Amino acid sequence: MNTYKLLTPGPLTTTDTVKREMMVDRCTWDDDYKVVTQKIRRQLLELAHVSEDDYTAVLMQGSGTFGVESVLTSVVGDQDKVLICSNGAYGKRMTDICTHSRVPFVHYAQDYDKVPDAAHVAQLLAQDPSITHVAMVHSETTSGILNDIQSVGKVVRDAGKTFIVDAMSSFGGVDIPVADWGIDFLVSSANKCIQGVPGFSFILCRRDKLLASEGKARSLSLDLLDQWKGMEKDGKWRFTSPTHVVLAFSKALDELAQEGGIPARSRRYTENNRLLIEKMRAMGFATYIDGSHQGPIITTFFYPAGVSFRFEEFYRYIKERGYAIYPGKLTEMDTFRIGNIGEIYPEDIDKLTGIIAAFLKERKEQIA
Ligand SMILES: *Cc1c(COP(=O)(O)O)cnc(C)c1O
């Protein structure tokens, strides 16, 4: 069994009951299995506060990036142009996807500790009428910043463009009224806030915009509309589906409902995050993102001042005592990250910060 819990933003710590679902082998064309896919698709739309008339859900094999790549390469045509607003590695990855598949794009690169500005997006759209789509990340896991997709969504809708959101590390842990916020395509994956295991991503699509993408896909296996057409018939995936992962995800969705849905999960994550930052600050750790934009999912901390600090040593010390944390993802600064999503509770934050306090005390004694 597990010897340590994951304080990483996915894969994350799942319940034993979710893991147990994977002990059974399923047949992909069996009706008992296909209905599970259809149940998952309905539940995802409910979580997004959208109706089946306006939206539809597509499940896509692979990790989260496969879902983002599927949308960008399937809905932005050769005559279209997507404005990518980035403030971290995941936003930047969208530009890499477009470069590889020759999807026309322009890039609005914001500083990593600031959110993309809706007024600036409006200006960019006004200046370049050839822009047809806008894409951005909600929770930038690179830093932990939570972007204002609501304000940008309003600007995008007012301009009559299509809005694509990577809500990978927020959907399920932060309540997102998808239609109200003007989101046309939202991407997330099985192993983040829904608390399933890795193996597929999912895309919530505005039905008319999905149908309008006919003929634009550049890839066979990542063709979003084709994947939807197959799944829509009877729940059978076009190509082999990750059966064990699908069952685990279905269970994870039921457990999310039992917990009290997204509002309850969001409260738990927010409390974990608040407690983590409070206790870390009390020990002298500073956060990279300032309070108003810090999201409830993952936090970037600077290395502590005044002690000799090697991340590998810190990581090992904490892992031997029950938790795995995350290295930093900023190239120019010495930071590490701690996620607080998954089967993690305030007791875990108490334990973790106790371990960190003990580490610092030992280091200070070594210097003295
Ligand atoms: C996890 C994550 C992804 C997808 O990463 P994969 O390694 O492909 O699963 C994309 N965007 C964000 C913001 C993420 O947190």
Image (spheres, helix red, strand yellow):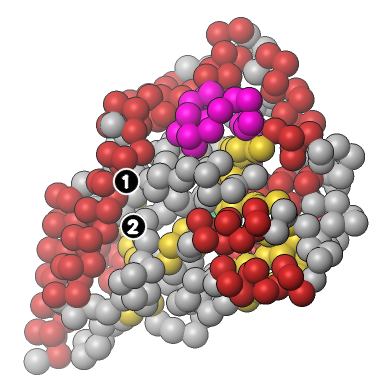
Amino acid type, label 2: Pro
Looking at the image, tell me whether mark 1 or mark 2 is earlier in sequence order. 1
Q: Is residue 152 left or right of residue 268?
A: right
Residue found 70% across the figure and 33% down from its top: 207
Residue found 18% across the figure and 60% down from its top: 275
- Horizontal and vertical percent position of residue 146: 43, 62
Q: Is residue 294 above or below residue 351?
A: below
Q: Is residue 2 visible?
A: no
Residue range (magenta)? 40-62
**Which is more toward the observer, 85 or 51?**
51
- Horizontal and vertical percent position of residue 214: 85, 37
Instruction: Give yes or no for contact between labels 1 and 2 (Cβ–Cβ under 8 Å).
Output: yes
Residue farthest to the top, as pictured:
31
Residue found 65% across the figure and 53% down from its top: 157
Label annotation for residue 266: 1
Q: Quadrant of the C terminus?
A: bottom left
Q: Is residue 107 left or right of residue 334?
A: right
Amino acid type, label 1: Ser
Residue found 70% across the figure and 21% down from its top: 232
In terms of secondary structure, where does tag 1 sit? Answer: helix
Residue 171 forms part of the magenta stretch = no
- Horizontal and vertical percent position of residue 190: 50, 38
Q: Is residue 290 above or below residue 11?
A: below
Residue under label 2: 296
- Horizontal and vertical percent position of residue 85: 63, 67
In terms of secondary structure, where does tag 2 sit? Answer: loop
**Which is more toward the observer, 28 or 56?**
56
